[in-house]
Image: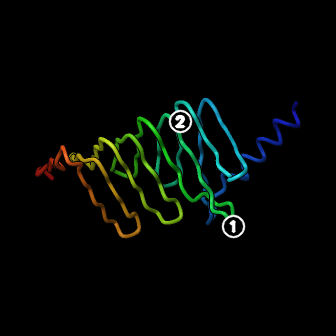
Amino acid sequence: MNKFILFLFILLISILKISNADEIFIESKELLITNEPLTTTFIGNVYAFDDEIKIWSDKILILYTETENQIDQIKSFGNTKLVRKNQEILSENVTYFVIDKKIYAKGNIILTQDENIMKGNELSVDLVRSTSIMKSNENKKVTVKINNNE
């Protein structure tokens, strides 16, 4: 039994490596690893973080590149909160494209930066180019509250 636990631990550590010597740390109530295709699923009160981003969610799915087994995407489902520097995103679902450094969120989004607030239904963020696009669905408009006190 101890050898099996050690094997799972070593497997998990090797799976969670990111390119460029970065690290990601994840904790949850349950862990599921599948090989075909290689995926790691964390379920229940999940918290994940690396040197740039912190994510809280009900469930996180990690997808890997086919050739090098590097983390390609981190997908969160349900009650997602993502924090990066002075920005916070609350949303139903978020996908973090690790290699491309992009974030896509969908569903009842509240984006807060300092005291400014933006609400919508879809959000795309390019972390390299520092650009963001917020969209609404047919029933709502994008809303923005800008604090002029700065």
Q: Which residue is tagged 2?
A: 46
Furthest-front residue in view?
138
Furthest-left residue in view?
148
Q: Is residue 101 left or right of residue 133?
A: right
Image coloring type: rainbow
Total of numbered circles in the picture? 2
Residue visible at 53% across and 64% down? 99
Which residue is more in the foreground, 106 or 7? 106
- In 3D space, how far apart are the residues under numbered discs 2 and 1 (Cα atoms)? 27 Å
Residue visible at 69% across and 43% down? 33
Quick one: label 2 or label 1, which is nearer the N terminus? 2
Percent position (x, y) of residue 56? Answer: 47, 38
Q: Amino acid at mark 1?
A: Thr
Residue 129 position (above or below residue 109): below
Q: Is residue 56 left or right of residue 37?
A: left
Residue 1 position (above or below residue 65): above
Percent position (x, y) of residue 43? Answer: 57, 34
Q: Quadrant of the N terminus?
A: top right
Residue 129 position (above or below residue 61): below
Q: Residues within 10 Å of mark 2 (few under 14, many from 20)?
A: many
Q: Which residue is tagged 1?
A: 67
Q: Nearer the viewer, mark 2 or mark 1?
A: 1
Q: Tag 1's secondary structure? A: loop
For residue 93, the mark is none
Q: Amino acid at mark 2?
A: Val
